[in-house]
Image: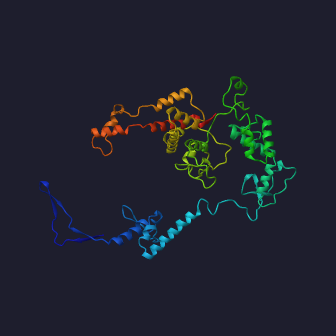
Amino acid sequence: MLAKTTDPNAKELFDPLPNDEKRNLSIYLLELKGIDQEKGQLWTDLFESDLSDPNLISEGAQDIGFGFYKAPGLFKFKDYALEKRLPADWSSQVARMKEDIEASKKELGDRYPFAYGLGEAEKPVDLRVFVRGNPDVFGEEAPRAFLSMFSDGNPKPFSSGSGRLELADAILKQPIAARVMANRIWAWLMGAGIVLTPSNFGIAGAPPSNPELLDYLAVRFQADGFSPKKLEKLIMMSRTYQLGTESTEANVAKDAGNRFFRKANTRRLDAEAVWDYLLTASGKIDLGKIGGPSQELADGMNRRGVYGISSRMFPNTFQLTWDFMTPNISIEGRYSTTIPQQRLFFLNSSMVHNQAQALSERAASESSDEAQVKRAFEIVYQRLPSAAEMAVSLEFLHLPQTTPLASIPPAILAKPAPGDATLTGETLEKKDKDMQAPKDSLLKAFCWALLSSNEVLYID
C-alpha cells in the first residue's frame, strides 16, 4: 500500500545531470506500508485463486485501467489452500479420509459395481402416426407390432413389455435375416460379400453374384442355431477360403471382378489385427486374461486390440490411423485407406520400436547370422527367406560397426555438444564412440524393417 505525504521543507529538488543540466523531482514523498505474510497469502487465496472465475467479474467490478477488481463473492477454501490452514487434529482427519478413499478404490478391482444400460419402461405406450412426418401433427395410434408387409394379414400387436424381444424373434423368422447375416460373415472372411451392399438387399441394392451359395449358407446358419462360429468354421474349412491370390489371364477374362471368388482377395489387416500382429511377432502379447475392462492402445498395453478403448469423444490415434470407424454411427463395414500417417506410424511409433527390440532379442538366441535371419522371417512371415532376401539381410547385418567422423557433415561437427564450449580432441573422441553401432542395434533395425513391410499388412 502506498501513502502519499508532502515534504514541508521541500523547495526545488532536482538530480544533477551531465553538462550542468537539472531534472526536477516531485515534492511528494512516498511511504511504503505492507501487511504480514500470512494475511498476504490469505488475500491472494481469496481474491486471486478462489475467485478467478471470469463470471464473477461482473456487476460491482471496477475498471482500474489495466484490469478489474473482482466483485465480492462467496469465500471458499479447497485443496491445499484449505488444508494448510487446518488445525492439527483436522489435518489428521483429512489424511485418514484420503487413505480410506484410496483403499476403497483399490478394493473395487477391475470390475465396477454398476453399469449403464437400457431398461424397460413400467408402462410402455403406443405412439401416434406423425401426419406427413410432422411431429406436431398426430394421426391415428400405431400399436407396437411387426411390419404388416411381412405378416399374413394384420400383424398381431406385441404384448410383452415394450415388444423389443418379440420384434427380435419376428425378425429372425424372416429368411432375409439369415441371408443378411450369412452375407456379412462371408464378407468379413473373404474380403467381399456375395451381395456387395450388405445393408441393402432391396431393388436399389446389388444383386447376389451367387444366390444359390447365399441360400445354402443361410440355411446352414439357421440349422446351426444362428451360431456365427459354426458358420465361420464352415467357410474357413472350404477350398474357396484357402485359395491364394494368384490369378491367370483366362480366369480374369471370365471373372474380372472376382465376383465368383476364383481366388482370394488381397486384404489389409484392420486396426485390431495390426496391433495383434506386432505383439505376436515380438512375443509380448498377453493371452492369459480374457475379458475385463478395456485399455488405451498405447505403450504398455500388451493385450489384444479388441480390448482397446473405443471412445466417441476422444478417439484413439492408433485406431484412427488404421481406419477404425467412429462409434457415433452405424456402418456396414470398414473402409481401407492408404495415408502417410500409416507409414509414419512404423517410422516413429515407440510401440513399433519396442516390438522390434523384443523381436530382435528372440532372433538373437540363434548362433549365426543366417539362423537369426531365418528365425526372424519364420516369426514375422511364417516362411523362410529366399536366396536374394538372405543375401540382402546378411549384407545389412554386416554393415560397418562404426561411422567415421569423416562421413559426418561438417555442420554437425561444428556444433558443440550440450555443455561443451568448444570441440576439443577429447570431445571428438567421445563423439566417435557415441557413433558406434553395435551388432544388436543392426539386428533391431532389421527386425524393424520386417515388421514395417507390406507383407505384414496385407493378407494374400
Nearest to the observer: residue 332 or residue 383: 383
Rendered residue at 65%/48% (across/down): 329
Q: Quadrant of residue 283?
A: top right
Q: Give the farthest residue toward the top.
A: 250
Q: Quadrant of the N terminus?
A: bottom left
Q: Is residue 90 left or right of residue 425?
A: right
Nearest to the observer: residue 397 or residue 406: 397
Q: Which colouring convention does the figure follow? A: rainbow
Question: How many marks are shown on the rendered structure?
Answer: 0
Nearest to the observer: residue 299 or residue 338: 299
Rendered residue at 50%/28% (across/down): 392
Residue 257, position in %: x, y?
70, 30
Residue 274, position in %: x, y?
59, 42
Q: Is residue 426 left or right of residue 46?
A: left
Residue 180, position in %: x, y?
75, 43
Rendered residue at 47%/70% (across/down): 95
Determine whether 422 is above or below 169 in the image: above
Q: Is residue 159 left or right of residue 48?
A: right
Q: Is residue 402 left or right of residue 423?
A: right
Q: Quadrant of residue 103?
A: bottom right
Q: Give the farthest residue toward the right.
A: 153
Q: Is residue 148 visible?
A: yes
Q: Quadrant of residue 337?
A: top right
Q: Give the farthest residue toward the front.
A: 367
